[in-house]
Amino acid sequence: MSWSLDDIPAQDGRRAVVTGANGGLGLQTAKELARRGASVVLAVRDTARGAKAVDVIRREVSDARLEVAPLDLADLSSVRAFAAAQEAAGEPLDLLINNAGVMATPPRTTADGFELQLGTNHLGHFALTALLLDRLRGAPAPRVVTVSSQAHRLGTIDFDDLNWQHSYSPWRAYGRAKLANLLFARELQARADAAGLPLRSLAAHPGYSSTGLQITGPGMSGGVVGRLNALGGRALNLLVGTSDAYGALPTLRAATDPEMPGGGFVGPGRIAQTRGAVGLVSSTAAGRDMDVARRLFDVSEELTGVDFGLPAAAAAAGVAR
Ligand SMILES: NC(=O)c1ccc[n+]([C@@H]2O[C@H](COP(=O)([O-])OP(=O)(O)OC[C@H]3O[C@@H](n4cnc5c(N)ncnc54)[C@H](OP(=O)(O)O)[C@@H]3O)[C@@H](O)[C@H]2O)c1
C-alpha cells in the first residue's frame, strides 16, 4: 500500500520549523505536521503572507499550533536573526524542513553577494541548519529534511565558479543549487554519524507540482520576457503538474516515517519520478558523490562563516548510498 497522510505518526510535543511555509509545498507540509499535533514555526520572508497562511491552515486545522517568524534566506543577517530568536526561545527543535526556494531566476545576487539560487536554496539553508544545530541537538530524535529536485540531474558543482561569476544559465544554476541541497543532506548525515549525533538528515523531491515556483523566478526578468516566462510556467503547471498536497508527501514522509533512513532521498516512484507511491528514489551519481559533498560542505562553511563543529567523517570517500 502507498504511504499516505494517514501514515504520519502523531507529532504531539514535537516542534518543527518549515521554511517558505506561506505557500506551495511548504504550506502543505506545515498544515499536515500541525494536523498531526506538531507545533510549527512558519519561517517566511513576508510575514503578512505568513499570517494569511496561518488563516488557511486554521480553516482546516482549527487547533493548529502555529507561529510566524521572519526569515529571508537570501540575507545571512536575517538567517542569523531568525536562529538567534529560536535560540533565545530555548526550545528543542525536532524537525527542520529546508523547503523554501526559487527557480530559474535571471542573474541576481543575495545580500551577501552569492548567486541568488545557490544563495537562497543552498547556502541560506546550510547556514540556517548550522545555526539551529544546538536546538536540534536538544531534541531526542531530530530530523532535517532538505527539499531538492529532479533538477539536480542538470547540476554540476564547479568549485572554480560556484557563484556563476563567469557565466550564467538560470536552469543550470537551479540544477546546481538543487544538487547542492542533495549533497548537503547526505554529507550532514555522514558528519552526524561520525560525531555520534542521533540526527537524521534526508532529502526529498516532489516530482513536478503546480506551485508558485514555476512563475516567480521565471517572471523576475520583468517586461514581456518575464510575462511570457511566467505564462509558460502557468501553462506547464496546468498540463503536467501534480497538486501541492501530493508534492508535499515526499517531504512529509522523509520528516516523519521511522523507516526512512538518514541520507535517503524520498520522492515519487513512477513515471520519471513524477507520480505514484512515494518512497526512496535514486539520484544521479553526482548526487551520491561524497567527495564533492564533503568539499562543498567545507566551502559552504567558509562562504557563510558558520561552523557546524562536525568534522568530515574519516575515509568515507567515494560514491555512497
Ligand atoms: N513545485 C515543484 O514542482 C518543485 C519541484 C522540485 C523541487 N521543488 C522545490 O520545492 C521547494 C518549495 O517550492 P514550491 O514548489 O512550494 O514553490 P513556491 O510555491 O514558489 O514556494 C517557495 C517558497 O519559498 C519562499 N522563498 C523564496 N525565496 C525565499 C527567501 N529568500 N527567503 C525565504 N523564503 C523564500 C517563497 O516565499 P515568497 O512567497 O515570499 O516568495 C515561498 O514560500 C523549493 O525548494 C523547490 O525548489 C519544487
Image: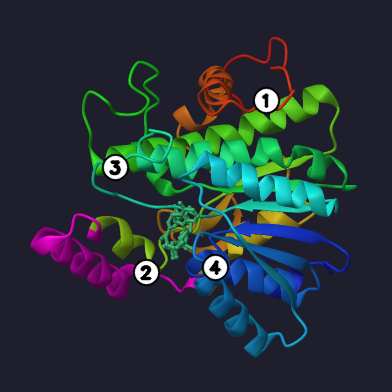
Q: Pick whichever of labels 2 and 4 is earlier in the sequence.
A: 4
**Can residue 11 be seen in the rendering of this structure?**
yes
Up-down relation of residue 209 to residue 305 (above or below) = below
Residue 275 horizontal/vertical position (percent): 46, 64
4 or 1: mark nearer the eye: 4
Q: Residues within 10 Å of mark 2 (few under 14, many from 20)?
A: some
Up-down relation of residue 92 to residue 2 (above or below) = above
Circle number at residue 191: none
Q: Which residue is under mark 1?
A: 307
* Dots 3, 1 in contact, CB < 8 A: no
Q: Which residue is under mark 2?
A: 241
Q: Residues within 10 Å of mark 4 (few under 14, many from 20)?
A: some
- In depth, the one of 170 and 152 nearer the eye is 170
- In depth, the one of 254 and 134 nearer the eye is 134
Ligand 1 sits in quadrant? bottom left
Mark 2 vs ligand 1: CB under 8 Å?
yes
Q: Pick whichever of labels 4 and 1 is earlier in the sequence.
A: 4
| Residue 313 image-quadrant placement | top right
Which range is magenta? 219-244
Does the magenta segment cover residue 70? no
